[in-house]
Amino acid sequence: MITILLSELAFLLPGHPFRGAIKPDPDGKARVVQMRDVSPSGEIRWANMVQTRLVGRKKPDWIVPGDILFVARGQRLFAIYVDEAPHRAVPANQFIHIRLRPETEGQILPAFLAWQINQAPAQRYLDSLATGTHLPSVSKSALSKLPITVTQPIEMQKQVVTLEQQIRQETEAYEALIANRQELMSAVAFDILDSDR
């Protein structure tokens, strides 16, 4: 096991700079990942994403599979692993776009890196660097200094990632079951309590 800075493992790119509101454009060739496109469990919902036209001279840093989007502003600062990118998309500016350096291939899995950023030791570190009280934020510079533990062999990382995916699937299944039970109870209550009306 070695511990190195995040900036030694990955490039940290800013979210795409939009001036003002992101304007929908059905003829636009790009989509934009915004906070509303992220599920509570940290999955990107690609289906209803805003389609727009990118303006300006900046060449877009398109999101590709294996990237990580870090939510840099808000009450919950966390990493999202991108396992698929079905559309040409850029992250909005509330994200820091993390992409592993080519020379780190085989040292750390991007999914393992995202998992590690979301664990208590990294979260405590990020909380200590966050600025702002109502809307805490972490700068790209501060995030770049996050210590990352690289475990070997890589199979150990794969096992952690697999376990994390299983836990997420189980959590989603339980949440869906709870929601179904609540709907059932609402229907029962309606039948019983509104029967005389």
Image: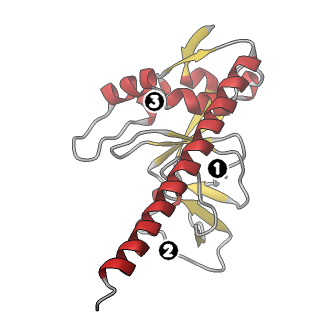
- Is the Cβ of the residue at disc 3 closer than 8 Å to that at disc 2? no
Q: Mark 2 points at which residue?
A: 23
> Residue at horizontal 45%, vertical 30%?
143
- Is the Cβ of the residue at disc 1 closer than 8 Å to that at disc 3? no
Q: Residue furthest top?
A: 1
Q: Please name which of the two marks, 1 or 3, marks the residue nearer to the observer.
A: 3
Question: For mark 1, does the 10 Å Cα neighbourhood hold few (<14), some (14 to 19), or many (20 or more) residues?
Answer: some
Q: In this view, does 186 lie above or below 109?
A: below
Pick whichever of labels 3 and 2 is earlier in the sequence.
2
Query: Which residue is at the front of the view, 94 or 42?
Result: 42
Q: Which residue lies furthest to the bottom in this view?
A: 197
Q: Name the residue under label 1.
A: 61
Q: What element carries label 3?
A: helix
Q: Name the residue under label 3.
A: 143
Pick whichever of labels 1 and 3 is earlier in the sequence.
1
Pick whichever of labels 1 and 2 is earlier in the sequence.
2
Name the residue type under label 2: Lys
> Residue at horizontal 57%, vertical 31%?
115
Q: Is residue 135 above or below residue 127?
A: below
- Percent from the top left, x then y, of residue 121? 43, 20
